[in-house]
Amino acid sequence: MLERIPQRERRDLLVAWAAIAVAFTFLYLRDFANPVGLLIVFVLSLLTVGIGFVLHELAHKFAAMHFGYWAEFQKDNVMLLMAVVLAALVGVVFAAPGATMIYGATTRRENGLISAAGPATNLGLCALFAGVYLAGLSLQSYWVVILGVMGVQINAMLAAFNMLPVSVLDGKKVLAWNKGVFAVLFVASFGAVIAALTFL
């Protein structure tokens, strides 16, 4: 699998991963105001955003490759900067630090399935981190609970944001392919956000 990820793509993923982790650290700034707390939150953001963001983009990549296309993630420096600045100034993360570029003329169905793979991966990770959260409660481990909470919230937000049916986001491509699949993913994504912010 690693052989299919060129060195340049690995660098772009790493830079985007770090930038979006910084952005989400700013999001939690009010809850962890001391330097040690912020460092821990940054590490937790690397883990949660890192897993969520990287697997989201790799899901697009390998779904495209499943259909016989070459695909690579490419970072967008302007969007990276915007994500960090917006998080710092207004507490909103605009999580679009780049995109997975697909080389070839995909059909509408292929494009829809490739696009759906990313948000579906984030929803799967929501379930995984919910398990981490429950394990933290069982173990009475504060930081494991926080890891679980952040993992669920961040992956839910990534799924919901990407399912918006606008611009170049996944939601628009899924909607163009299959309204039923779009409705399921859209409701599941925003339902996960509401549940994560209400109950965790």
Image (cartoon, helix red, strand yellow):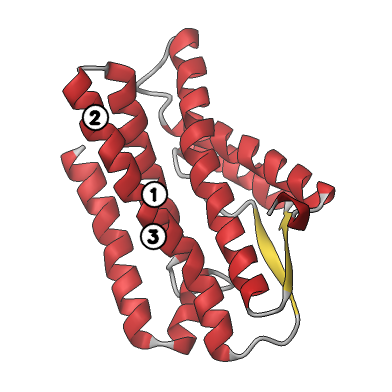
Residues tagged 2 and 3 counted as in contact (Cβ below 8 A) = no
| Mark 1 nearby-residue class (10 Å; few <14, some 14–19, many ≥20) | many
Where residue 183 sits: x, y (%)? Answer: 31, 78
Marks 2 and 3, how far apart in space?
Answer: 25 Å
Tag 2 residue: 135
- Position of residue 5 relative to residue 87, above or below, is below
Q: Secondary structure at mark 1?
A: helix
Query: Closer to the camera, 79 or 126?
Result: 126
Residues tagged 1 and 2 counted as in contact (Cβ below 8 A) = no
Tag 3 residue: 160
Marks 1 and 2, how far apart in space?
Answer: 15 Å
Q: Which mark is residue 68?
A: none
Q: Secondary structure at mark 2?
A: helix
Sequence-wise first label, 1 or 3: 1
Q: Quadrant of the N terminus?
A: bottom right
Tag 1 residue: 125
**Label 1 amino acid?**
Leu
Residue at x-position 75% and y-position 58%: 4
Q: Secondary structure at mark 3?
A: helix
Is 58 displayed left or right of 157 in the figure? Answer: right
Q: Nearer the viewer, mark 2 or mark 3?
A: 2
**Label 3 amino acid?**
Ala
**Label 2 amino acid?**
Ala
Residue at x-position 30% and y-position 49%: 127
Query: Closer to the camera, 64 or 76?
Result: 64
